[in-house]
Amino acid sequence: MIAKNKQAAAIYRVLFFLLAAFPIIPLRVMPVIIVAWCLLSLAFFSTGFFEDKKKQFLLLVFIAPYFLYIISLLYDPDKDVTLYLLERKMSLLFVPVCFFFARGALEKKDLKTFFDIFILSAFLEALWVNFAILTTKGSLEPGPYNDLGYAYRYAFEKFSHIHPTYMAMMLFFAGFLNIHYFFSDEKEFIFKKKAMRLIITLILLLCGILLGARLPFLAFMVTIFIYVAYRFKSFKKTMGFISVFLVVSLIIILFTPVFKSRMAEFDHFKLKPALGYDVNSANIRVGIYHCAFDLLKTNWLTGYGAGGLQVELNNCYDHYPAYIYKVKKFNVHNEFLNVWLCLGLSGILLFLISLVTPFILAVKEKQVLYACFIIFFCTCCLTENLLSRQMGILFFAFFNSIFAFQPVEHGMGEPPGPDQPDVDDLHTKDIMH
């Protein structure tokens, strides 16, 4: 830990570790922790940080989209919505700035502790919510659709106050990090430690699958395959691990009613919007994407602003003969489309640059964890506006900034060398926002 004041450094470290527990800390408490941590980050400011041009460029591309939202106030018909969104997205501005200016404040062991606290927090959050569901009478009432899967997702959100897709995203990424440390821990041959990581990983994955979030699960599968292929550098070992992993995942899926019911939505799926009362999370999204692409054709250059976009979407939904579009107003359910429709061509280009640039650097510098994180996040963005909810914003801001500005890897993500052993939903809360 590099700091002029040992007491300030200790407090900074404690606040940093508290940030890692955001899956289980109430969202109303997190802003207080973030503000205190940001203010303390100023103690590590050094003009020498400006000598690193690569880090400066990364910081600029990370925060540029936020300033475009500020500029959009000039033409947004509903400025109140945009101001609310700017307040909610503040972490996308201040978190990378603070990590940039406190680059010398943390060591690799601090980052590993951060990841372990995140893993444990996601694990404990899932455990206590499932315990509450099982011990609360009537929490799993199937409801009007007689679907236990949807009832579980609804109950999980009621107890946790976290959207099931966002919770699944954190559970799967925590599982990915735990798999990484399963292979990378310095104490390679301590059986108890590895066994504990393996058990926690299996529970994390089971809880994520129980939530029936399809894209986070797909993102996890893609990410873990890339990670394993990179790490082992051996076709036999890679295929062996993937085969075992697929069999275990398939068994869990086949015996998980929530995931089965979510996949069953595609049994008779047609690329048509929801009609009447024949609705599910798949055909609802068809109508959403039809409207989104129609709006994109009309105004792809400048966008509609954050407030104006929802008004235009609502007007489009009114033309569909399905009750769900009349009673609920949905966002775009795709972060890339959302940014384009809100900020126009310049917005989507800046957003893509903020993802592609660090990905290229991560690949060049062999920072496999960072590259995998970007792949995981981008995949999850395909069916959700991940940066519209506080939990998604915190998830992206923390991990993206840590990987970009802190000494996470420098060999941690490298494959073993010669001297290393190989080691969404009918319920409104699910389909809105």
Image (tube, rainbow, N blue to C red):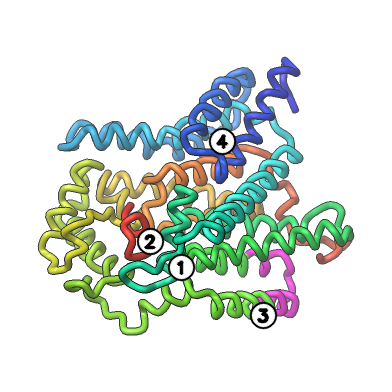
- Quadrant of the rendered structure where residue 151 is? bottom left
Residue 138: x and y in percent read 45, 61
Q: Does residue 275 lie above or below 76 as drawn? A: below
Give the secondary structure at mark 1: helix
**Which span of residues is magenta-colored?**
227-242
Say whether marks 2 and 1 touch (CB < 8 Å).
yes
Q: Give the residue type at disc 1.
A: Arg
Does residue 69 appear to the left or right of 60 in the view shown?
A: left
Distance CA(mark 2)–CA(mark 3): 27 Å
Say whether marks 4 and 1 touch (CB < 8 Å).
no
Front position in the image: 341 or 432: 432
Distance CA(mark 3)–CA(mark 4): 39 Å
Instruction: Name the residue located 64 percent from the left edge and 21 percent from the top edge.
Output: 44
Q: Give the residue type at disc 4.
A: Lys
Give the residue at mark 3.
243
Which mark's residue is nearer the viewer, 2 or 1?
1
Give the residue at mark 1.
214
Give the residue at mark 2.
383
Give the secondary structure at mark 2: loop
Distance CA(mark 2)–CA(mark 1): 9 Å
Which mark's residue is nearer the viewer, 1 or 3?
1
Q: Is residue 63 magenta?
A: no
Judge the density around disc 1: few (<14), some (14-19), many (≥20) Cα neighbours within 10 Å.
Answer: many
Distance CA(mark 4)–CA(mark 2): 31 Å
Pointer 2 or 1: first along the chain? 1
Give the residue at mark 4.
55
Say whether marks 4 and 2 touch (CB < 8 Å).
no
